[in-house]
Image (spheres, rainbow, N blue to C red):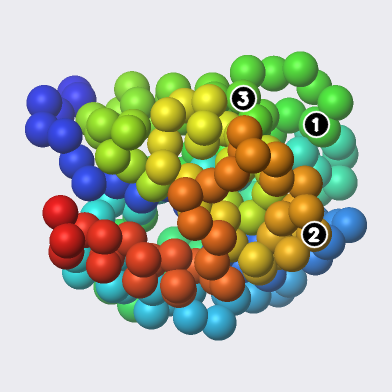
Amino acid sequence: MQSTKVEKVIFIDRDGVINEDPIGDYVKRWQDFRFIPGVVEALQNLSRAGFQIVIISNQAGIGDGEYTEEALNEITSQMLSEFKKNGISIRGIYYCLHGKTANCECRKPKTGLFRQAACDIRFEASETYFIGDKLSDVQAGRNFGFRNLFVLTGHGSTDQMKLSKEDAPEKILPSLKEAVDYILESNDRE
């Protein structure tokens, strides 16, 4: 049952923001998963500040037959285990499992994954951040009414050049660590 209380929620893309993104390939097994430096500490800081963390990620490799849903589940389980060991609680994870050419409603820049999350968690979109490293992340966040932060890890350094004035995020930052610092400083001022 959905709570009536509005929660402090942060939405975060996975590949290229939380973990290293093997550009041109996929993280297909846990052995290939590497946290980007500073991520664990940043998520600990968000958790301590009372934010609910939600991961939103396109995983087209499943729909395109590059790896299996079972492999994704194993990666997710191991990632959550590492977070738990470090005192980090993840409120939810929402994946689009369709291929790159599928015209589904859940593949970013469409907002289906956010709508799914909104069925489970009460939040005010205009007060909620979405942190991503791709143009499609910024577009999805804008389409849903989020405050967007763009990081230069993963695809960020190349996708930054694709951002138009219409797609401009609230802030461009080096990594998730600096994005979380920005959120926490902004939260303190409000």
Describe the element under mark 1 as helix, strand or loop.
loop
Q: What percent of the width, then of the height, locates residue 111? A: 54, 25
Inter-mark Cα distance, 1 to 3: 14 Å
Q: Residue at x 69, y 60 (%)?
A: 156
Q: CA distance from mark 3 to mark 2?
A: 21 Å
Using the rendered view, name the quadrant where residue 76 is placed: bottom right
Q: Which secondary structure, mark 2?
A: helix
Instruction: Give the residue number, with chain letter if any, for mark 2.
Output: 158
| Residue 166, quarter of picture | top right
Q: Is residue 187 visible?
A: yes
Task: Using the image, tell me which numbered label, if any, was put on residue 9.
Answer: none
Q: Give the residue displayed 52% in from the left and 32% down from the top.
A: 142
Q: Position of residue 26 (x, y in %)?
A: 79, 56
Q: Residue 143 at what x, y percent from top left?
A: 53, 26
Q: Residues within 10 Å of mark 1 (few under 14, many from 20)?
A: some
Amino acid residing under circle 2? Thr
Q: Is residue 43 left or right of residue 163?
A: left
Q: Residue at label 1?
A: 99
